[in-house]
Amino acid sequence: MTSTLTPKSDRLNAPVIHRLSNGMTIIAEQLPVDAINFNLWLNVGSVLESNEINGMAHFLEHMIFKGTDRLKSGEFEQRIESRGAVTNAATSQDYTHYYITTAPEDFADLAPLQLDVLLNPTIPADGFDRERNVVLEEIRRSDDNPRRRNYQRLVELGFDTLPYNRPVLGPTSVIETLRPEQMQAFHQQWYHPSAVTAVAVGNLPVDQLIAIVEKSLDTVGWSAKTEHHRPHDFAVDAAYTDIVRQEYEDASLQQARLMLMWRVPGLMNLEETYALDIIANLLSQGRTARLVQDLREKRGLVSGVSASNMSYQYQGLFTLSATLPTENLEVVEAALLGHINQLQQELVNPKDLEKICTQVANQFIFSNETPSDRANLYGYYYSILDDLEPAFNYTDRIRNITPEAIQTAARKYLPTNALGILTVRPKGE
């Protein structure tokens, strides 16, 4: 077992990384805030599922809380809430994480409960069927949400083979057929200590935080487990070679939606993502951003416009999105591509770039101040990249972006003659 103190220098963050012989990584940091956030991260999301069990990772997130040999169904939440603590979980394409936020004096009592439900769920058949109905209702609500429908259309056009094109919740037809033994097999395959990054941030000494997590593992019977989390990899989708269009009608919409997308590097190619982050902010962050000023404020062609660099683990999508009257679709599409072309042909004014880089860097800093912010930051980067350095040097990377780097990224990754274009019109228009 080893502990590593991240070099402090002038950083605001100074977590300790502690690796256990069973493969689990514990990250701990003391903050002078009267709370502890205990966050358990796994690099296990919907991307790992086959089509036959699509939705299993999210369904399992629900079943984790349905009891263990030590805890009856509902007892975990009851014991957490009786201390005034809170608990929740989330599943994405690339990860699943579970957390509790508690008072420091309760951490030693509650941490074993969190580890027990994560590593030892019984997945009872009766609870499975009841929770299936909850998940099916969640799918129905998602299908009824225009924003989520459009996101699903976006990723289906954005990815040909990568499993990011499937819904995290899974389709109704699959969830209706899943069986408890399939979930038990999925849990056994992916949920073991070497797959877990356990992050504890709050107002206890680091040595005490680590000791509590280690003792908790012993309490729930996992301190000596040595199963290894198997690596997994995916081939990325090739960049578009021409313009690929997809059109839909949606009766729930009052205005059309226009989405332009490019396949770009993801977190596994992290260095290539920073300039794209800045381009997205340069185009749409705030009322003075280029797209907002041109298309909404000056010309009144759109009611809303945005740019986003979505960095998944294996690949990303850079998108431009607009909400607009149907009759403006053609001119807005041309205008959006015109702004990309401008980035390719003209260097960004250094003062404008400095302003945007400062905004992005400060937003990153401001969003990582509380125990839960820090725990999520560390868990996210370490579970996906096995490294915390990107969490610490993000602001430096952003502030060092040059006008030439912006131009290079726009030319390399955002060709105006090779992209996906998604149009969703109000029905009948």
Image (cartoon, rainbow, N blue to C red):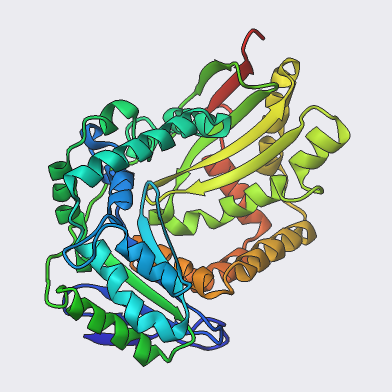
Front residue of 237/204: it is 204
Name the residue at the right extreme. 298
Q: How many marks?
A: 0
Relative height, residue 122 to residue 324 (above, below) = below
Q: Position of residue 99 (x, y in %)?
A: 40, 65
Left/right placement of residue 31 relative to residue 65 reads right
- Residue 74 pos. (x, y %): 32, 58
**Residue drawn where x is 85% and y is 30% of the image:** 299
**Quadrant in the picture for the C terminus:** top right
Horizontal arrangement in the rendering, residue 47 relative to residue 369 (left or right): left
State whether residue 230 is above or below residue 336: below
Residue at 40 percent across and 48 percent down: it is 92
Q: Residue 250 location, x and y as percent?
A: 58, 18
Residue 211 in sight here: yes
Residue 201 or residue 163, whichever sits in front: 201
Say which of 167 and 204 sits in front: 204
Q: Is residue 156 above or below residue 377?
A: above
Quarter where residue 275 is shown: bottom right
334 lies left or right of 130 = right
Residue depicted at x 43% and y 49%:
312
Residue 260, x across and y down, in percent: 58, 31
Asked which quadrant contains residue 283, the reply is top right
- Give the position of the N terminus as an image quadrant: bottom left
Is 296 drawn above or below residue 355 in the view shown? above
Which residue is outermost to the top? 428
Regarding residue 382, the answer to whether it shows in the image is no
Residue at the spot 43% in from the left edge and 86% down from the top edge: 105
Q: Nearer the viewer, residue 324 or 291?
A: 324
